[in-house]
Image: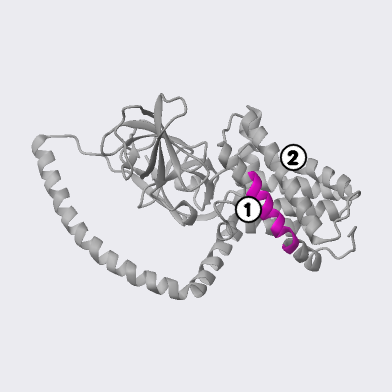
Amino acid sequence: MVLSISIPRIRNPIVSLFRSPMIIVQTIKREIGGFIFFHKNLIENEKLKREGDFLRSQLNETRECVLENRRLTQLLSLKQKVSYKAVAARVIGRDPSNWESAVIIDKGKNFNIKKGYVAVTFLGLAGKVVEVGSAASKVMLINDPNFAVSAFVQRSRYEGLVSGSLGNSLMMKYLSKDSDVKTGDMIVTSGLTVLFPKGLLIGQVREVGEEFSELSRYAVIKPAVNLAALEEVLIIIP
Amino acid sequence: MFFLFIILCAIIQVSLSDSIQFFWIKPDLLFIALVIAGITFKARAAVTFGIVCGILKDAFGIGVFGMNSVLFPLWSVAIITLTRRISLEYNIYAVIFVALFACVNAITTRVLFAFFGMPVPVWAFLRIAFFESLYTALFFPVVLKVAKDFVIRKKYAF
């Protein structure tokens, strides 16, 4: 009880104290990286412009579908999905240990962030908030072995539990032996884990195998988010 | 002055280590600072620096707070005892020494994680224990040179 109260009081002031130097170092690193990787950035910029134009055209088509969906939903008098608020935060540091996978972000209690809130990017699920200070917070990433979220295969709706394995892949365990899951399937959150909205993209199945006990199956998942190059996250405020 | 060096190692490890990581492994600069303190300073100062290194590593992490704060001073004492008996005159000896010590640290950390009910996959443990130790040891001569040239003014054991 004493430890659970005193440990954040030791950790949070230290992290808050280092917040400004970490932000300065990250800014300098980004600027120097811009000079060093100028040519690479130029090529990537052109590629992204072409991709942006393509996605804009896709977006227009999708807007039409959304409007039609709204009209039909109203017609059928179905409940609307509740949209949620999000706070953007910059990643200013990472866990110094190789045994955990976490990032430090530059927002904290002053932005109504609380422990347990989900961190996402535009590509998918990134992690969850595990510690909150006044001006900085720590986010446990999805590839941390202590992270676990209930998920299902988007195509076949078979459920399992996704957890991290300290690398560039995740494990989806407790899939039933007869589950319909194959390479290339998309894995999304099921909404059964508290505070995790349903439908957040986690990743794509890379490999499917059978557990040693032969009672269930597992899937190796490639995360949708590039966790090694995470620079910004959105914290979902429920 | 060495306190500032430790703080600099902590900032670099937290802010820039993702730029120098290979296969999700980054060098443990705070552990290197601990070893430098152990081989350079007297017992009381070395243990104090060890505690500071441990507290900083725990403060920026999300694991059990206090694990490194307790382990690092113990490693300081062990390093002080061993370096009075072993010559680390050549860089290769120092690299091997740091690699072995980092490996022992990794094994101890794994055992403690298991004790606290925080699982780590076996293959992840082997990867971290082996590669982190090697990577940290390879960084040691560079960091030691920086510490010698800019921070530590007086002569020491080797």
Foreground residue among B125 and A54: B125
Q: Are marks 1 and 2 in contact (CB under 8 Å)?
A: no
Q: Neighbour class for label 2 at 10 Å: few (<14), some, many (≥20)? A: some
Q: Is residue B156 above or below residue B81?
A: below
Picture residue at 51% right of the left edge, 69% below the top: A33
Q: Which residue is mark 1?
A: A17
> Image check: B61 left or right of B136?
left
**Boundaries of the magenta span:** B129-142
Q: Which residue is mark 2?
A: B71
> Image check: B14 left or right of B75?
left
Classify residue B27 by image quadrant.
bottom right
Between the residue at mark 1 and the residue at mark 2, the CA separation in whole angstroms equals: 24 Å
Classify residue A47 by image quadrant.
bottom left
Q: Could you say whether the residue bearing mark 2 is in a helix, strand or loop?
A: helix
> What amino acid is at disc 2?
Leu
> What amino acid is at disc 1?
Leu
